[in-house]
Image: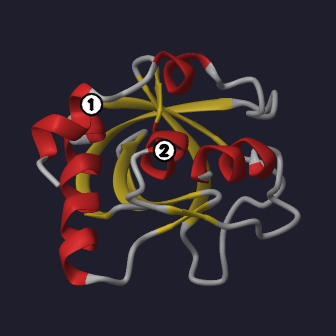
Amino acid sequence: MVLSTLTQQITPEVLVNKSCIPNNPVQIGRVVEVIDGSTIKVLIDGLVYVVRYIGVESPEDEYIGRAARQLNSVLVYGKDVSLVADVSNKDENGRLLRYVVAGNTFVNLEMIFQKLGTAVDIPPDSACAQIFNQAEQ
């Protein structure tokens, strides 16, 4: 996979299909590090938090995992992002669980749509599970 090809294939559906995101308070933060295809570090109000994308599992394969990290970097690194929780605030490892929007791109959905993330439904954070599963098809 060529990264430039991937970023050119961002679809209008992924840009606008954010209707599943719950109407919870939005946090704004600046992405300071991309850890992998579904985890980032975000500066929010002077503190850095590890943020895990809701509903997305990063690829285990080294090559695809590297491509996922690269695309994630293109989408979010150094940018201000909107972060929205579902039901849970954090996972068992203390990472914030969030839906992430960068500009007009719903990043969680884009990673799945580009086949660089797998849709996972971990209740109770399931608001976008149906859309994520459809994107994976």
Residue 133 x, y percent position in the rendering: 70, 53
Considering only order in the chain, which callout, 1 or 2, is on the residue closer to the N terminus? 1
Amino acid type shown at disc 1: Lys
- Could you tell me which residue is drawn at 38 percent across and 52 percent down? 47
* Left or right: 66, with 110 as reference point: left
Q: Distance between the residues labelled 2 and 1?
A: 21 Å
Contact (CB < 8 A) between labels 2 and 1? no
* Left or right: 6, with 82 as reference point: left
Residue 17 x, y percent position in the rendering: 64, 23
The colour scheme of the drawn protein is secondary structure
Query: Does residue 119 sit above or below 133 in this rendering?
Result: below
Residue 54 x, y percent position in the rendering: 63, 57
Which quadrant of the view contains residue 121? bottom right
Amino acid type shown at disc 2: Phe
Query: Does residue 66 sit above or below 131 in this rendering?
Result: below
Residue 77 x, y percent position in the rendering: 22, 42
For the residue pair 63 and 71, the one nearer the viewer reads as: 63
For the residue pair 80 and 4, the one nearer the viewer reads as: 4
- Could you tell me which residue is drawn at 66 percent across and 83 percent down? 92
Quarter in which the N terminus is drawn? bottom left
* Residue 48: mark: none
Looking at this view, name the residue that lies furthest to the right.
124
Residue designated by label 1: 79
Dot 1 lies on which element?
loop
Query: Does residue 119 sit above or below 5 in this rendering?
Result: below
Residue designated by label 2: 113
Disc 2 crowd, CA 10 A, few/some/many (<14, 14-19, 20+): many
- Could you tell me which residue is drawn at 40 percent across and 19 percent down? 103
Dot 2 lies on which element?
helix
Query: Does residue 75 sit above or below 123 in this rendering?
Result: above
